[in-house]
Amino acid sequence: MKPNKLITIIRDPREVRRFLVWFYLIGVTGMLIPVTSAFFMRLTPLALLMNFGLLLIHHENKFSTKTILIFSLILLSGFFIEILGVQTGIIFGEYMYGKGLGWKLWDTPLIIGLNWLLLVYTTTTITQKIKTHNIIRIALGAGMMLIYDVVMEQVAPRMDMWTWKDGIIPIENYIAWFVIASLFHTLIQFTGIKIRNKLSETVLIAQFVFFVILFILL
């Protein structure tokens, strides 16, 4: 395929949506087949990077200095909160990361901060389409992230992403998720950052359905 044609396809939201549907269908199939499951699990960090790259390409607003700083703050804060959580067990409860999310620093995957930013980004895109008060947008965004986490937590140990002490997910994990997600959404809303992206809903829904299917079948 010629580079120009590939660029045209990547920039076409309809083509990318089709690609993402097939990508996650193949991914979930690969996860469910015992012979290929280990290989596909190791692709999780690359899949996350790919999704984020596609979102950046289709970001419709200007990347101002303020936007870059806020996004960077969310990414780094998410990473260091996870480090604190892993090392102390006082934020989310006692848990340990496996190999499923790739390279680690201080027992924490380097990519985990990007995951926080991706979830805040995609849910913000949805909430900012709703004409309502910022407080309600913040609650809705944090609520969507909480629902996403509830499902993801059931699958994460099977994908070797992380495991909980005694295999029990503490309620404080969900409380912390909602509080932290609320803080990040508050930061976005009250700094006036606007996010428009035609791929956000597709990426978020595709990932969510992916985890739901694995939860049911894995």
Image (spheres, helix red, strand yellow):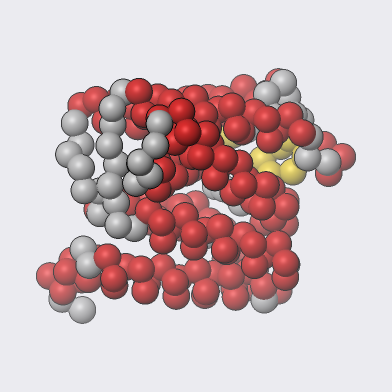
Name the residue nearer the viewer: 34 or 148: 148
Q: Position of residue 137 (x, y in %)?
A: 44, 36
Q: Single out the residue that lies furthest toward the left.
A: 4
Q: Indicate whether 112 appears above or below 155.
A: above
Q: Single out the residue that lies furthest toward the bottom.
A: 1
- Residue at the image point whose x is 20% and y is 36% from the top: 63
Q: Position of residue 53 (x, y in %)?
A: 32, 52
- Which corner quadrant holds the C terminus? bottom right
Name the residue nearer the viewer: 139 or 35: 139
- Which corner quadrant holds the N terminus? bottom left
- Residue at the image point whose x is 57% and y is 64% from the top: 210
Q: Residue 156: in sight, yes or no?
A: no
Q: Indicate whether 118 appears above or below 64.
A: below
Query: Which of the 4 image quarters holds residue 187?
Result: top left
Q: Single out the residue that lies furthest toward the front.
A: 132
Q: Position of residue 209 (x, y in %)?
A: 57, 63
Q: Residue 192: in sight, yes or no?
A: yes
- Residue at the image point whose x is 36% and y is 68% from the top: 17
Q: Indicate whether 7 appears above or below 46.
A: below
Disc count in the image?
Answer: 0
**214 relative position to 56: left or right:** right
Name the residue nearer the viewer: 37 or 181: 181
**203 relative position to 163: left or right:** left
Q: Position of residue 12 (x, y in %)?
A: 22, 67
- Residue at the image point whose x is 17% and y is 69% from the top: 8
